[in-house]
């Protein structure tokens, strides 16, 4: 929080000095596009955040960014444009796949990734050692500081006193009139919603001028007004905030940890992990005799979530230690590098142990979202730890930058991965070998799994077939409902394919 406070203070200084500016034409076009984006936001929220509408909304924000800043952007040879590859995959996933889990994660991550991409395109040489603080400042703090910038844009478009020489209209009065119109509409809407009699007299007054045939502001209309107004102001302010900063260097100071401070906990952890690894090799991999009360099946299958959590802790220590340890001399540097290397090697053992336990669990109980995504997360942790191992001994590699690139690339691949189809197919294969399947769980999968559910609907087991057939009938009714089959903003290729299969 203190780092963000420093960022805001410095940002205000730059803004006061008049560092931020956009040409009038770009500012006006940006304002119009921001309003359109606000209207799109309202429509998408009304129809649900999935489908083609979400993709259109995200694309409109990219267009807004490029149009408003086109006079200041240098796109030729700009490596920041590579960010648009993962961004495009995440944006259009909701149009092609029907998995709500990944789409929900995309809704959370896209603002972060899109802001990171916008920073990379704007600065060319983006600094990665404080990415979270940098991005959070641009998402939350800076737009709030520029929320009323549209008013200054409108004011610039109004004729000056010099232009109005001989005309008895004060430009400040004209600006006040323009500001009063939306303000009065919002206040009238509130008061009309709060008091029925006031709503009646306002309606009668407007009807007398034939301004509106029927005046009625419902609570729902108020919500739409606020979404469009708030969204438009935020989108415009978000893009405007980039014009103030001309360097990617974060405003805050860089903290460091003494080598002795980090060496003590890492050394103790390595000792604990050595003991843990000895036990793992003795009982889990080596098939040693377990104490009374323990069964191998239970021992092998339990604990993978805990191991993944410890692995995350280890990598966080390594990430901070490698980039923030203050070393004096070559021997101290080598000693710290050795400690970090041992920590990574023990982490590899934990990842393998977690993967080993997960595979046993899946082969016994089948595949679920949680088990599949945890396995993928373990693979990501393996790649990140390998990157850290290289960065420890090869200092030219920025570990922060490697983490950002690897994480975004991996998450992009996950967006291309059809998890529901994979889970359905894998569970059917387990069923063919073991005769066990959780048919009710398969009914919770999205429409991406429909082709495999159809295969299971004619199963020889009447219980399994009945559960699947009942689910497919419900899906058929839901997919063919009028609202979902005709609304372009909700269009999705996977749902359309399932609709054809279930006719």
Image: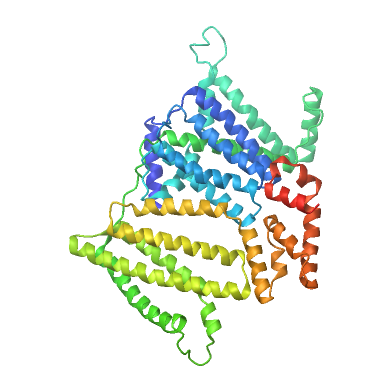
Q: What residue is at 81 percent from the left and 45 percent from the top? A: 482
Task: Return the residue found at the far top.
Answer: 166
Return the residue nearer the eye: 52 or 288. 288
Left/right placement of residue 301 relative to residue 457 reads left
**Quarter-of-image position of residue 429:** bottom right
Left/right placement of residue 117 relative to residue 255 reads right
Q: What residue is at 65 percent from the left and 74 percent from the top? A: 433
**Quarter-of-image position of residue 490:** top right
- What percent of the width, then of the height, locates residue 117? 46, 42
Left/right placement of residue 35 relative to residue 286 reads right
- What percent of the width, then of the height, locates residue 51? 66, 46
- What percent of the width, then of the height, locates residue 238? 50, 38
- Viewer can see residue 194: no
Return the residue nearer the eye: 260 or 122. 122
Q: How many marks?
A: 0
Left/right placement of residue 385 relative to residue 486 reads left
Return the residue nearer the eye: 76 or 240. 76
Task: Return the residue found at the far bottom.
Answer: 292
- What percent of the width, then of the height, locates residue 301? 54, 78
**Quarter-of-image position of residue 216:** top right
- Viewer can see residue 312: yes
Q: Please, which colouring scheme is shown?
A: rainbow
435 versus 226 height, above or below: below
Q: What residue is at 36 percent from the left and 67 percent from the top? A: 344
239 versus 26 height, above or below: below
């Amino acid at each position: 929080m203190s780092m963000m406070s420093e960022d805001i203070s410095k940002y205000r200084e730059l803004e006061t000095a008049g560092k931020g500016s956009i040409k009038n034409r770009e500012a006006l076009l940006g304002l119009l596009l921001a309003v359109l984006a606000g209207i799109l936001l309202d429509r998408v929220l009304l129809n649900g955040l999935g489908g083609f509408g979400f993709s259109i909304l995200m694309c409109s924000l990219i267009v807004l960014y490029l149009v408003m800043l086109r006079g200041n952007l240098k796109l030729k040879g700009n490596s920041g444009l590579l960010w648009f590859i993962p961004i495009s995959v995440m944006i259009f996933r909701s149009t092609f796949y029907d998995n709500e889990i990944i789409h929900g994660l995309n809704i959370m991550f896209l603002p972060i990734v899109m802001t990171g991409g916008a920073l990379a395109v704007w600065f060319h040489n983006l600094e990665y050692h404080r990415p979270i603080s940098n991005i959070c400042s641009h998402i939350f703090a800076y737009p709030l500081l520029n929320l009323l910038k549209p008013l200054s844009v409108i004011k610039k478009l109004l004729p000056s006193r010099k232009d109005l020489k001989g005309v008895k209209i004060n430009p400040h009065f004209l600006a006040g009139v323009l500001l009063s119109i939306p303000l009065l509409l919002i206040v009238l809407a509130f008061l009309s919603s709060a008091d029925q009699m006031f709503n009646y007299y306002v309606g009668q007054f407007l009807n007398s001028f034939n301004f509106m045939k029927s005046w009625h502001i419902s609570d729902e209309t108020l919500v739409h007004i606020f979404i469009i107004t708030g969204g438009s102001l935020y989108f415009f302010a978000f893009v405007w905030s980039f014009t103030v900063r001309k360097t990617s260097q974060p405003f805050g100071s860089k903290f460091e940890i003494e080598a002795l401070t980090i060496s003590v906990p890492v050394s103790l952890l390595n000792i604990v992990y050595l003991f843990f690894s000895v036990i793992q090799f003795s009982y889990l991999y080596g098939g040693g005799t377990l104490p009374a009360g323990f069964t191998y099946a239970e021992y092998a299958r339990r604990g993978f979530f805990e191991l993944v959590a410890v692995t995350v802790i280890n990598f966080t220590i390594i990430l901070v230690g490698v980039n923030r340890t203050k070393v004096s001399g070559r021997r101290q540097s080598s000693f710290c590098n050795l400690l970090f290397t041992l920590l990574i090697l023990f982490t590899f053992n934990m990842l393998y142990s977690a993967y080993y336990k997960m595979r046993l669990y899946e082969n016994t109980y089948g595949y679920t979202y949680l088990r599949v995504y945890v396995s993928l997360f373990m693979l990501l942790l393996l790649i990140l730890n390998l990157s850290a191992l290289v960065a420890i001994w090869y200092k030219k590699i920025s570990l922060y930058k490697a983490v950002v690139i690897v994480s975004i690339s991996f998450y992009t691949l996950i967006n291309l991965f059809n998890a529901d189809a994979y889970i359905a197919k894998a569970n059917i294969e387990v069923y063919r070998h073991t005769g066990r399947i959780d048919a009710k769980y398969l009914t919770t999968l999205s429409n991406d799994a429909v082709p495999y559910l159809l295969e299971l609907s004619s199963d020889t087991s009447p219980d399994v077939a009945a559960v699947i057939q009942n689910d497919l009938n419900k899906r058929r009714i839901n997919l063919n409902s009028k609202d979902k089959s005709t609304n372009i903003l909700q269009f999705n290729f996977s749902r359309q394919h399932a609709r054809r299969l279930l006719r």
